[in-house]
Amino acid sequence: MDRHKTDSRYAAARLLVTLALMMIGASGMYVVPVVLPTVQAEFGVARAAASTSYSLLMIGFGVGGLLMGRLADRFGVMVPLLIGAASMGIGFTAAAHAQHIWAFNLAHGFLIGLGSSATFSPLLADTSLWWVKRRGIAVAVCASGNYLGGAVWPPIVQALVERHGWRPTYLGMALFGFAAMSALALLMRQRPPLSQPAGPSAFANGVEGRPFGLTPTAATVLLCLAGLACCVAMSMPQVHIVAYCGDLGYGPARGAEMLSLMLACGIVSRLASGLICDRIGGMRTLILGSVLQGVALLLFLPFNGLVSLYVISALFGLFQGGIVPSYAIIVREHFPAREAGARVGAVIMCTMLGMALGGWMSGKIFDVTGSYQAAFVNGIAWNLLNLAIAVFLLRGTLKPKRIVHAPA
């Protein structure tokens, strides 16, 4: 049957459902930067304390991705999706009724973050198992749903908050997220094929032996550290652009527009990176994205005019959008298919921890210095660490491979 084959019509239809799920799940990630100034003012807390909600959300997203990936490996992706739908509905409702900042923050970390996680790493891993010939572009399309949600949700949330307040907005998102995710999850019952090969370069790079010339554990740890570092850098503009524009006197609405533009350009970047991935592989695509992200972060230092910030936000989205999806391709190129959910989940967990750490760290640096300039420099330093690890791992794939014979 068509639905049991990779690169099939069913796989394409499933990809469209995955795209919609990614977009809906992204609401949990991108609502906080928009409501950050309003929530900070209502609860009367410092910028770092208000940013903690985003940091906890990313921690919940990351840890949840690891757990949800393991569930998907064992039971199929529908189960974590249904759990995620319930978690998001309860989380938005709890946050809407929070009377203290700690309750607001915990709702994001333990509920909204967990719910959103079901629509990211498990779906990236699931998509990689349904495609072989065009795996790079398929994973890129899947991951674009997250940025598509990032492009759509900020202006919608900003308009609803201005008209109705952030609490009614959260209640509306609770109802919509639960209903839409639950309905779409039921279309994802079919388990992916498990016997497909990882790809033409996989066994050459040691899928069943030593990925990058390292033990599987060491290779995974380095990928996790690379993911952490790149997303500490990535989080600075994504989490704080709205607040940054408010501090410069441009207003939060302009910042929300820049965030939307940044993530819309990220869609283009993710699709382009998918095509590039199919040609040069995941690791080289990661290195390319890391270099370009560093360039964009450097541009934030000398330029803070309104037009300049719009242009740099667009460039930042174009430059960094393909970084996180490349990790899913790297895992499929260098590790066995049966471990896809767990290993992709582990690496994506660390990227989310990086977003959490970077979001909080940038807020703390602002509180200490009264400026975001030092926070941008901090992001650039972390980006250099990501680039160094990626180059080191790539060198491991270029060394002559030692054939390891199984014991008789």
Image (spheres, rainbow, N blue to C red):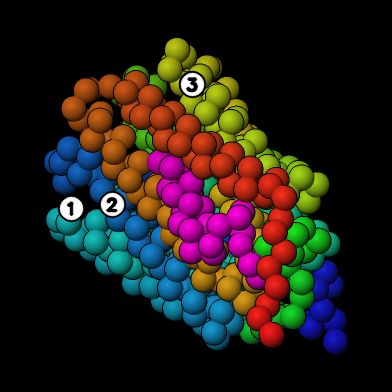
For the N terminus, give its image quadrant.
bottom right
Q: Is residue 140 visible?
A: yes
| Kind of element beneath mark 3 | helix
Q: Is 66 a magenta residue?
A: no
Gap in angstroms between the C-alphas marked 2 and 3: 27 Å
Q: Quick check: marks 1 and 2 in contact, CB under 8 Å?
A: yes
Percent position (x, y) of residue 176? 48, 67
Q: Earlier in the sequence, mark 1 or mark 2?
A: 2
For the C terminus, give its image quadrant.
bottom right
Residue ID for mark 2: 53
Q: Residue furthest front?
A: 408
Instruction: Please say if 331 is above or below 190.
Output: above
Eye-nearest disc, 2 or 3: 3
In the rendered structure, which segment of residues is drawn in magenta? Answer: 208-234
User: Callout 1, which amino acid?
Assistant: Ile
Along the horizontal axis of the image, is 158 left or right of 111? right
Percent position (x, y) of residue 382? 42, 35
Q: Which mark is residue 101?
A: 1
